[in-house]
Image: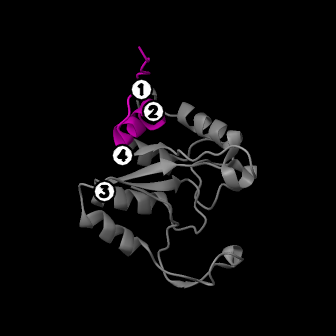
Amino acid sequence: MLIHMEALMRSGPMPDDLNRPPNPSQITENITGLERLLSHNQRATIVWAHAGLDNTGDRTPDLMRRLLKAHPNLYMDIKIVPARLGKNPPFDADGKIKPDWLRLFQDFPDRFMLGSDQGYGGDPKEMGSAQGLRTSVLMVNQLPKDLARKIGNENAQHVYHFSSESKQEP
C-alpha cells in the first residue's frame, strides 16, 4: 500500500505558508493514525511516499527514524522536486546529502527507494519533472555503491515484487 500524506505532529491552524486553497484552514495530527495502521497488520507493506518533500516541517529524519525502528513493515519512497525542496530536504545548500539523511539511509538500507511518481509534462514544479529525476539520480550517485544499488533499484524490486530481468516474448 502506498500512502501520500504530510507528517502532522499536532493539530491546529494551517501554517501561514500553506494557508491557501485548496488546503483546509485546520490540520489534524496524523502520526498516531499512521502508527495505528502500521500496527494493525504488521504483514502489510506500507510505503510512505515523498520522503524529502516535506511541506510541514514535521517529516524530519528523527521522526522517520523513530517510525522505521518501531515498524518493520514501513518503507519510504524518496521524491525530490528541485523547484520546491520543502522544509527538510536531504541536501545541503551545496547539493550534498546531509549527514542525518545519510545516516538514516545507512541505518535502514532496505527501507528506502526512489519515488515512482516522477511525472513528465504539465507544471514541472508540481509533477517532479525530468529535473526531479535527475536530482534523484545525483543523490543516489552520492551514496556508497551497495546502498545506491538498494535505494536506486533493489528495494523497489523487493517491495513491489518485480524482477530486473527483462523477459522476451518467444
Give the label, 1 or 4, closer to the camera: 1
The spot of residue 27 in percent (x, y) is: 55, 80
Contact check, label 1 and label 2, Cβ < 8 Å: yes
- Disc 1 and disc 3: Cα gap in Å? 28 Å
Residue 120 drawn above or below residue 36:
above
Kindly identify the amino acid type of the residue bearing the numbered disc 4.
Phe
Per the image, label 1 sits on a secondary structure element best described as loop
- Disc 1 and disc 2: Cα gap in Å? 8 Å
Given residues 91 and 4, the one toward you in this image is 4
Kindly identify the amino acid type of the residue bearing the numbered disc 3.
Lys
10 Å crowding of disc 1: few (<14), some (14-19), many (20+): few
Name the residue that disc number 4 marks.
108
Residue closest to the far right:
123
Task: Reply yes or no: does residue 152 show up in magenta.
Answer: yes
Quarter of image, res 69: bottom left
Q: Which of marks 4 and 2 is nearer the N terminus?
A: 4
Quarter of image, res 35: bottom left
Q: Is residue 109 visible?
A: no
- Disc 4 and disc 2: Cα gap in Å? 15 Å
Q: Which of marks 4 and 3 is nearer the N terminus?
A: 3
> Mark number for residue 69?
3
Task: Reply yes or no: does residue 167 show up in magenta.
Answer: yes
Q: Is residue 81 visible?
A: yes
